[in-house]
Image (cartoon, helix red, strand yellow):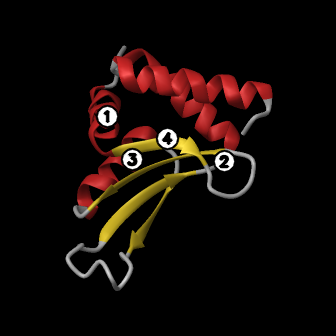
Amino acid sequence: MIDPNFIWAVGIFEGEGYMGKRSVGNSARMFVSMCDKDIVERFQAAVGCGSISLFRPPAYKDHWQDQWRWYLGKKKEVINLIERMLPYLGERRAYNALNILDDLELGLY
């Protein structure tokens, strides 16, 4: 049975999420950043992993609002979540997800 909360979370990820290589280290990461803490908390509950923290923009970006960020950086958890999301992702995100999985398998991340 398909969990409607998980499908909702995939939609949030499609619009607000990021997946790619970490800027340091040899791993992949995923995050969702939004100003609405309750939505980020609901996202975390739906996917069942990751952590949430407050992200404050740099002082020179004074027009930005504080954001809540769900973050996932553990390799095994990233792989697991990408594989669970993959059937529901749109074409562009699915292509990116498959490339990340390939790179993780090859040890490029």
Residue under label 3 = 45
Q: Amino acid at mark 1?
A: Glu
SS for dot 2: loop
The 10 Å Cα crowd at callout 3, few under 14, some 14 to 19, many 20 or more, is: some
Q: What residue is rendered at 52% in x and 46% in y?
A: 49
Q: Amino acid at mark 2?
A: Lys
Single out the mark in the foreground, 2 or 4: 4
Single out the mark in the foreground, 3 or 4: 4
SS for dot 4: strand
Q: Which mark is residue 74?
A: 2
Label located before the other in sequence (4 or 1): 1
Looking at this view, name the residue that lies furthest to the right: 107
Mark 2 to mark 3 CA distance (whole Å): 17 Å
Label located before the other in sequence (3 or 4): 4
Residue under label 1 = 14
Q: Amino acid at mark 4?
A: Met
Which of 50/67 is in front?
67
Label located before the other in sequence (3 or 1): 1
Single out the mark in the foreground, 3 or 1: 1
Residue under label 4 = 19
Which of 109/79 is in front?
109
The 10 Å Cα crowd at callout 4, few under 14, some 14 to 19, many 20 or more, is: some
Left or right: residue 65 versus residue 75 is left
**Considering the image in quadrants, where does the C terminus appear?**
top right
Where does residue 14 sit, x and y in percent of width and height?
31, 34
In the image, residue 64 above or below residue 86: below
